[in-house]
Image (spheres, rainbow, N blue to C red):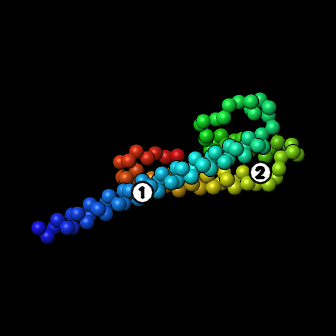
Amino acid sequence: MGFIPIFISLGGFVFLFAILVHYNLLQKRKSMQAGLIDIFGLLDQLNTDPAQKDQPPRADFKLTLAEQQFSEIRKSPQENHDPEKIALLGEKILQAKRIRYEHNKLIKTKPYSFVARLLGHRDI
């Protein structure tokens, strides 16, 4: 009879831990998606290629694609690019990389990996 409160407390702790990890991973994923939308918005402003401007908006935002386009913009000798926007874009890409690293590292850490696997979270 004395063990029932211990089991209830332990079960509540595990349940709250799972909810906290799930919420934290969802927030990181949402901030990554919002960051990628900002990055591709800035890339569209900086992109001067008329063939790419006529395309419909992209639904598959990938950080590697953004990095490739950013390196092409930095290499291009065009003087009509705003250096402040290029610097802001570089900062946002670094921030997105940091969020991706934190999310993936959290998923691979031992007690969090069990909850992430149980609730279906994957690497970004």
- Determine the residue positioned at 64% across, 45% down: 37
Which percent across, then down, holds residue 3?
16, 67
- Determine the residue positioned at 32% across, 58% down: 15
Give the quarter of the figure containing the N terminus: bottom left
Which percent across, then down, holds residue 23?
44, 55
Q: Which residue is mark 1?
A: 21
Asked if 32 appears above or below 54 in the picture, the reply is below
Residue 108: mark: none
Q: Quadrant of residue 99?
A: bottom right
Amino acid type, callout 1: Val
Disc 2, SS = helix
Residue 86: mark: 2
Asked if 63 appears above or below 27 in the picture, the reply is above
Asked if 122 appears above or below 24 in the picture, the reply is above
Which percent across, then down, holds residue 60?
59, 37
Q: Quadrant of residue 7?
A: bottom left
Count of all numbered marks drawn on residues in the image: 2
- Determine the residue positioned at 60% across, 49% down: 34
The reply to whether residue 72 is in sight is no
Give the mark nearest the N terminus, 2 or 1. 1
Disc 1, SS = helix
Amino acid type, callout 2: Ile
The reply to whether residue 105 is in sight is yes
Q: Which one is in front, 110 or 28?
A: 28
Q: Which one is in front, 101 or 87?
A: 87
